[in-house]
Image (cartoon, rainbow, N blue to C red):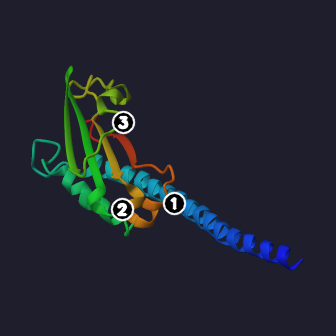
C-alpha cells in the first residue's frame, strides 16, 4: 500500500505543474484577447475622431488647397494621446485619403505617416456615398461633396504592448486596423 500511495503522490506532483502551466496559458490567452479587443476599440474611436477632425479642420486659413502637405503627420500627432500609453508608437501607421470633386473630375490625395499601413478599402470605392447638390444656385448645382478617410494600423500589436505574448504561440493577430470615412462639411458652398 505504501508503494501505491507513493506512486500516486508522484503522479500528482507531476500533474500539478502541468495544471498550473495550463491555467497560466489560459489566463494569459484571455488577457491577450482582452488587450486585442481594447486596442481595437481605441483604434476605432481614434480613427473616427481623426477623420472627423480632418473633415472640419484641415483647411488652413487663407489657402486655396483644402489640405496641408503635412496633414497626415498632424493627424498622427493628434492620434498619439488617444492610443494606449503602453503601445509602441513606432508600430502605428496612418493613411489620410481625401477625395475632392470639381465638375466631372475627382482629385484624390493620399498621405501617409508612421509605420507602413495598407487600407482595405480605397476612398474611390466610396465615391457613390458623396451627395451631389441639387440646388438651383449655379455655383452649387451638381457639386459633389468631399470625402475623407483615415486608416489607422498597428503591426504586431501585442508584442508592442508586452513581450510575454511572443512565447505563448497562440494564433493572435499580427496586425490591427481601423478605417473611418466621412463626408466633408464644406460641400454646399
Residue 143, numbered label = none
Identify the secondary structure beneath mark 1: helix
Residue 44 percent coordinates (x, y): 43, 51
In the image, which is nearer the foreground, mark 1 or mark 3?
1
Q: Is residue 1 left or right of residue 160?
A: right
Which image quadrant is residue 180 in?
A: top left
**Dot 2 corresponds to which residue?**
160
**Dot 3 corresponds to which residue?**
120
Identify the secondary structure beneath mark 3: loop
Taking depth in this image into account, of 104 and 75 the one nearest to the observer is: 75
Residue 92 percent coordinates (x, y): 30, 55
Q: How many other residues sit within 10 Å of disc 2, few (<14), some (14-19) or many (≥20)? A: some
Q: Is residue 141 above or below residue 6?
A: above
Would residue 149 be seen by someone viewing this image from the given angle?
A: yes
Residue depicted at 73% across the width and 74% down the height: 10
Furthest residue in direction right, as rendered: 1
**Upstream in the sequence, badge 1 or badge 3?**
1
Identify the secondary structure beneath mark 2: helix
Q: How many other residues sit within 10 Å of disc 3, few (<14), some (14-19) or many (≥20)? A: few
Residues under labels 1 and 3: Cα distance?
24 Å
**Dot 1 corresponds to which residue?**
32
Q: Is residue 47 above or below residue 132?
A: below
Taking depth in this image into account, of 174 and 121 the one nearest to the observer is: 174
Q: Is residue 165 left or right of residue 21?
A: left
Residue depicted at 39% across the width and 47% down the height: 177
Amino acid at each position: 500500500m505504501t508503494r501505491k500511495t507513493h506512486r500516486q503522490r508522484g503522479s500528482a506532483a507531476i500533474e500539478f505543474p502541468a495544471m498550473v502551466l495550463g491555467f497560466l496559458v489560459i489566463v494569459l490567452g484571455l488577457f491577450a484577447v482582452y488587450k486585442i479587443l481594447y486596442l481595437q476599440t481605441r483604434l476605432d474611436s481614434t480613427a473616427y475622431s481623426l477623420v472627423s477632425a480632418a473633415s472640419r479642420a484641415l483647411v488652413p486659413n487663407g489657402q486655396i488647397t483644402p489640405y496641408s502637405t503635412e496633414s497626415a503627420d498632424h493627424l498622427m500627432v493628434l492620434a498619439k494621446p488617444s492610443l494606449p500609453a503602453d503601445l509602441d508608437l513606432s508600430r502605428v501607421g496612418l493613411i489620410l485619403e481625401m477625395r475632392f470633386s470639381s465638375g466631372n473630375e475627382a482629385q484624390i490625395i493620399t498621405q501617409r505617416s508612421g509605420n507602413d499601413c495598407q487600407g482595405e478599402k480605397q476612398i474611390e470605392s466610396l465615391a457613390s456615398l458623396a451627395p451631389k447638390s441639387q440646388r438651383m444656385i449655379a455655383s452649387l448645382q451638381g457639386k459633389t461633396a468631399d470625402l475623407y478617410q483615415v486608416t489607422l494600423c498597428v503591426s504586431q500589436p501585442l508584442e508592442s504592448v508586452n513581450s510575454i505574448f511572443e512565447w505563448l504561440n497562440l494564433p493572435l493577430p499580427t496586425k490591427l486596423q481601423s478605417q473611418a470615412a466621412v463626408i466633408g462639411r464644406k460641400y454646399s458652398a
